[in-house]
Image (cartoon, helix red, strand yellow):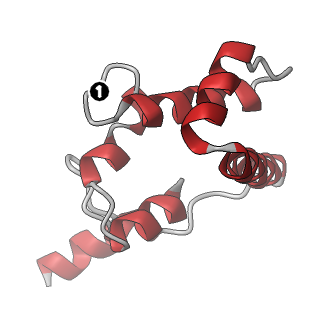
Amino acid sequence: MDFGYWENAERGMDRRKLHDVPVWRESDAYTPLERDVMEYAEAMTATPPVVGDDLAGRLRTALGEPAFVELTAMVAVENLRSRINAALDLTSQGFKDSCDVPGARPTDAAATATAD
């Protein structure tokens, strides 16, 4: 999440979309296709996975089979990475500390540098 936010912000992704990920269902920042992708990622990474035929069909129609397979692979890779990080108790590397996150508190290092 930390590095993903930074990487997408640096590449020009709408910061509102990045900020609204935790509330994607309520946010109007996402298109219907983006909402389907978010729903698919959640359903695919549930234990056990709970991907419905209707959702998979909508995505196959909208994206085409090759892109649907690529989406599935990327969700699986990110889920793998997340589970490895959780199992090894790996924490943030500080990338989000340099991102423009509304309402974020500065880190101790940033607060010290500002005070100097």
Up-down: is 41 above or below 100?
above
- Give me the residue at 72% from left, 44% from top: 65
Locate residue 37, reporting x and y percent. 55, 35
Q: Which of 80 and 71 is in front in this view?
A: 71
Q: Which of 90 and 113 is in front in this view?
A: 90
Up-down: is 68 above or below 113?
above
Tell me the residue that label 1 is attached to: 27
Up-down: is 100 above or below 105?
below
- Count neighbours of disc 1 (C-alpha within 10 A) and say few if under 14, some if 14 to 19, many if 20 or more: some
On the question of residue 104 being in view, the answer is no
Locate residue 110, reporting x and y percent. 27, 73
Locate residue 40, reporting x and y percent. 63, 29
- Give me the residue at 32% from left, 45% from top: 17
Name the outermost residue toward the bottom.
Answer: 116
Does residue 46 appear left or right of residue 10 in this picture? Answer: right
Instruction: Please identify the quarter of the rendering in which residue 64 is found.
Output: top right
State the count of labels: 1
Does residue 66 appear left or right of residue 7 in this picture? Answer: right
- Give me the residue at 45% from left, 37% from top: 34
Q: What element carries label 1?
A: loop
* Amino acid carrying mark 1 in the image: Ser
Locate residue 50, reporting x and y percent. 77, 17
